[in-house]
Amino acid sequence: MKNHRLQLLVAKLAKLSLGKDSSLDTERVCGIIAVLKEIYEGRELRSILCAYLAAIEKFVTQTSMKIEHCGTLSSSSIETLRSHFEKILGKRLSVFVESSDDLIAGIRIFISDLVFENSIAGVLNAYKKSIGTK
């Protein structure tokens, strides 16, 4: 399959993979994979599935927000952070929360390739860099 045609097909499949709330629908993904297995085979199937996987991974990465925190973080704080970043980015985010003892205090948020840090560890690291120590 030509590269351009593959890209168009994968883009359409990725759109079909979304549910009504614009989030990834696993049932749709499974259905799409089943149909692809019926239509294609061999190398062509493999190239389509690899490209489709890459598109899905990119979507999941861009719509996931990982919050690292030290100590406790209330569910209302998590919801406030999620709604704040959803408004800024204009898209719905799935939230994953993880405790991290190396933060000392505060939080660190990862969304795609963006990192937002408000922790003592982040302040100390920035200070170390500014004075030229490792």
Image: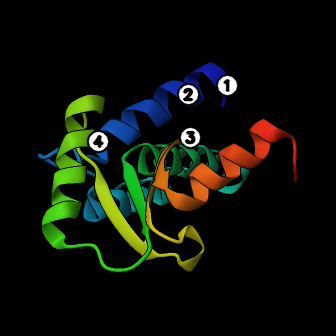
Label 1: which secondary element: helix
Q: Position of residue 33 (x, y in %)?
A: 43, 59
Location of residue 113 in the rendering, given as x and y in whole percent from the top left corner: 56, 40
- Provide the secondary structure element on which disc 3 rests: loop
User: What type is the residue that disc 1 sits on?
Assistant: Asn
Other-residue count near label 4 (Cα within 10 Å), few / some / many at <14 / 14–19 / ≥20: some
Q: Secondary structure at mark 4?
A: helix
Dot 2: element: helix
Q: Quadrant of residue 42?
A: bottom right
Give the amino acid at mark 4.
Leu
How far apart, in angstroms, are the residues tagged by discs 4 and 3?
25 Å
Q: Residue, x 46% and y 68% (percent of image)?
A: 105
Q: Is residue 102 above or below residue 46?
A: below
> What residue is shown with label 1?
3
Are the two marked residues, 2 and 1, in contact with CB atoms closer than 8 angstroms?
Answer: yes
Nearest to N terminus: mark 1 or mark 4: 1
Contact (CB < 8 A) between labels 1 and 4? no
Among the two numbered marks 4 and 2 on one chain, the one whose residue lies closer to the N terminus: 2
Residue where numbered disc 2 is placed: 7
Front residue (pair 61, 119)? 119
